[in-house]
Amino acid sequence: MHLGVCHAVTLPGEWEQAIADAGALGFEGIELFVRANTAADLLDHPERVTSLRDAGERAGVKFPSLGLIYFTPDFRLYVLDPAVREAVIDRVRQGIQRCAELGGTVVLVPGAPPLDDRPAVDAYVDSLKRLAPDAARLGVKIGIETSYNAAETKEILGRVGSPWVGDYFDTGNAAGKGMDPVGEIRERQGQIVHIHVKGTRGSDLASGTVDLAGVKRALAETGYDGWLMLETSAGDSPLDAARRNLATFRETFG
């Protein structure tokens, strides 16, 4: 498995600075977060990829994934307004393109509708189906991050029906919603494309809110050998917090 870190949550600040910090700390990769206020800088300016890749080369870190964190309540893959949903799909399509250009293989797409809202769920599934061919063409998997449990996630992914759309699992989010991350990983075997690792509410890995040893066993049992992305909270001293959690990370996962 490979150890990476999330920009913004764990290493806040400008992209280039976070990339440099990730390399200095010893992470193998970084997941850049593209938020609403920075989306245009990357999505509308493909030349920006070159400067980011140069920063990655200087720091010795890869870009395994790109976090598309620019959705709002009125700008999601499951909005019912056809024109708005079309705009959202186009924006995600651009994110997939930029991820591929950065050398990444997964885009994080957070936010999913309540399962009892059938029109929204149908729109969500349709949007993912429409994006799957773009993901396949570019060799980038779409990782959906939801509040669904394993069975619910499997149902959604089954409806989408593409190996290019999978589960971006988050240990802290699962535990925070009363799920057992260890059991969830086992039940999601073959679905998970990427993993955020943290305690509940972004707490330190050593907080004990997630059974890290159990997570390691479950990953081995299910054959997951992809990236684990640290997403603990930066706190008042981001570099110290990241260094502390990286040490726990390495002690547990190697």
Image (cartoon, rainbow, N blue to C red):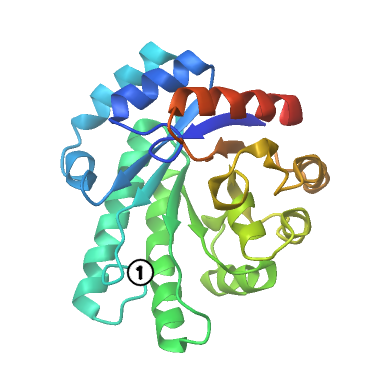
Look at the picture and state if 43 lies above or below 250.
Answer: below
Q: Identify the residue at image location x=43%, y=32%.
A: 236
Report the side of 237 relative to 84 (left or right): right
Where in the figure is residue 151, as x and y percent of width and height? Answer: 69, 72
Q: Quadrant of the C terminus?
A: top right
Q: Identify the residue at image location x=49%, y=79%.
A: 114
Res. 61 visible in picture: no
Question: Mark 1, residues whose alpha carbon is within 10 Å: few (<14), some, or many (≥20)?
Answer: many
Look at the picture and state if 32 lies above or below 51.
Answer: below
Q: Quadrant of the N terminus?
A: top right
Report the side of 141 relative to 173 (left or right): left
Report the side of 142 relative to 180 (left or right): left
Q: Identify the residue at image location x=62%, y=60%.
A: 176
Front-most of 208 and 36? 208
Front-most of 117 and 49? 117
Look at the picture and state if 48 lies above or below 57.
Answer: below
Res. 222 visible in picture: yes
Front-most of 142 and 35? 35
Q: Secondary structure at mark 1?
A: loop
Where in the figure is residue 121, as x and y percent of width and height? Answer: 46, 80
Look at the picture and state if 112 lies above or below 99.
Answer: below
- Residue that label 1 marks: 77
Where in the figure is residue 107, as x and y percent of width and height? Answer: 43, 48
Hey, what amino acid is under mark 1?
A: Leu
Where in the figure is residue 103, as x and y percent of width and height? Answer: 41, 31
Q: How many marks?
A: 1
